Image: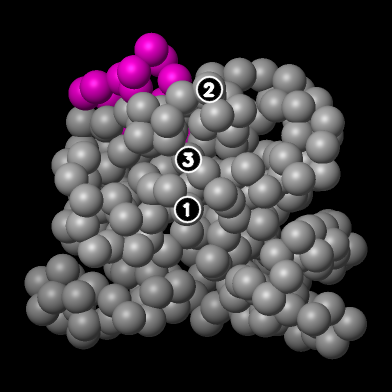
């Protein structure tokens, strides 16, 4: 890879409630940004390695290197990258059992900084590095939250999600932030898997009404909401970016990406056939 002046934004997708739709959104947002011409690296740090196989590969990493070799410095970061069949879209695959990496991370407190430090070595190669995380609390989840410039948290409109959000996910991010010193991320929440039921609407109101004064964190709930649509699951099975197959999904990802990455607003409008949305 050639050196350039890029400095990637590192995005950590974090929720310690399983089934929140993290991996699907990582694949969708990464594919959308790559389609815009941005160079994107996905990193699969989930214990259910969906992102590793979300898109077909055109070139595997040297010696099948992946997350294990990246974290443990067994290989250079650049040699842990696989190329997908989609232009501008690469991935570091999960290639070790989650439990073995978690045990290794627990050996020394400083190990939770390894992911952040290793991804920093790849900043000049990409526009965006998007990291998927486990859907439960462990040291790898901490490492992912520490690595991000932005932390994105999908929240389902359910009573359980509303009660879990502050108690588990936000509390974990706050506790992990002691490793960050002054380098604090912005945390962006968004409603995922919205449906038209009364319960869903009530829970969205409760989630949006939550306050976070006790946490010394920059937390914002995005206006955009992603509904439950079959096209997101279909995109994974077809190994195709969802915005190429479904106009509604393309509009939703465009709106969400504008909130996540405000500096891309004009480029997104151009990408959407010049129509401001």
Q: Are marks 3 and 1 in contact (CB under 8 Å)?
A: no
**Residue located 42% across and 64% down the image:** 9
Label 2: which residue? Answer: 74
Percent x, y of residue 82: 33, 28
Q: Going from the N terminus, do you reach mark 3 or mark 1 first?
A: 3
Give yes or no for residue 92 being in the magenta stretch: no
Q: Nearer the viewer, residue 228 or 82?
A: 82
Q: Nearer the viewer, residue 5 or 155?
A: 5
Left or right of 20? Residue 31 is left
In terms of secondary structure, where does tag 2 sit? loop
In terms of secondary structure, where does tag 1 sit? helix
Q: Quadrant of the N terminus?
A: top left
Q: CA distance from mark 1 to mark 2?
A: 17 Å
Q: Nearer the viewer, mark 3 or mark 1?
A: 1
Label 3: which residue? Answer: 43
Q: Are marks 3 and 2 in contact (CB under 8 Å)?
A: no
Task: Provide the residue span drawn in magenta.
Answer: 50-65
Q: Nearer the viewer, residue 103 or 266?
A: 103
Q: Are marks 1 and 2 in contact (CB under 8 Å)?
A: no
Percent x, y of residue 206: 78, 78
In the image, is residue 72 above or below residue 144?
Answer: above
**Residue located 72% across and 40% down the image:** 111
**Residue located 76% across and 45% down the image:** 110
Left or right of 130? Residue 5 is left
In the image, is residue 228 above or below residue 207?
Answer: above
| Residue 56 seen in render | no
Q: Which mark is residue 120?
A: 1
In terms of secondary structure, where does tag 3 sit? strand
Percent x, y of residue 40: 32, 50
Q: Going from the N terminus, do you reach mark 3 or mark 2 first?
A: 3
Q: Quadrant of residue 212?
A: bottom right
């Amino acid at each position: 890879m050639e050196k350039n002046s890029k400095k990637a934004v590192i995005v950590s997708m974090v929720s310690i409630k399983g089934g929140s739709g993290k991996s699907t959104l990582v694949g969708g947002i990464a594919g959308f940004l790559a389609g815009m011409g941005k160079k994107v690296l996905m990193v699969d740090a989930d214990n259910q390695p969906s992102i590793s196989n979300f898109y077909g590969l055109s070139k595997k990493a040297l010696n099948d290197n992946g997350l294990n070799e990246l974290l443990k410095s067994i290989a250079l970061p650049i040699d842990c990258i696989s190329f997908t069949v989609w232009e501008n879209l690469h991935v570091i695959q999960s290639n070790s059992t989650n439990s073995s990496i978690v045990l290794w991370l627990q050996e020394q407190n400083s190990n939770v900084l390894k992911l952040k430090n290793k991804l920093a070595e790849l900043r000049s190669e990409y526009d965006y590095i998007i990291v998927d995380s486990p859907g439960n609390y462990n040291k790898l989840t901490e490492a992912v939250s520490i690595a991000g410039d932005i932390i994105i948290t999908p929240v389902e409109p359910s009573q359980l999600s509303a009660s879990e959000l502050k108690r588990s996910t936000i509390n974990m991010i706050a506790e992990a932030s002691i490793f960050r010193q002054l380098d604090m991320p912005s945390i962006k929440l968004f409603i995922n898997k919205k449906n038209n039921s009364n319960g869903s609407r009530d829970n969205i109101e409760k989630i949006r009404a939550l306050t976070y004064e006790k946490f010394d964190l920059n937390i914002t709930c995005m206006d955009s909401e992603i509904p439950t649509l079959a096209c997101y699951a279909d995109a994974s099975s077809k190994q195709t970016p969802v915005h190429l197959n479904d106009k509604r999904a393309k509009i939703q990802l465009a709106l969400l990406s504008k909130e996540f990455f405000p500096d891309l607003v004009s480029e997104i409008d151009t990408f959407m056939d010049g129509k401001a949305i």
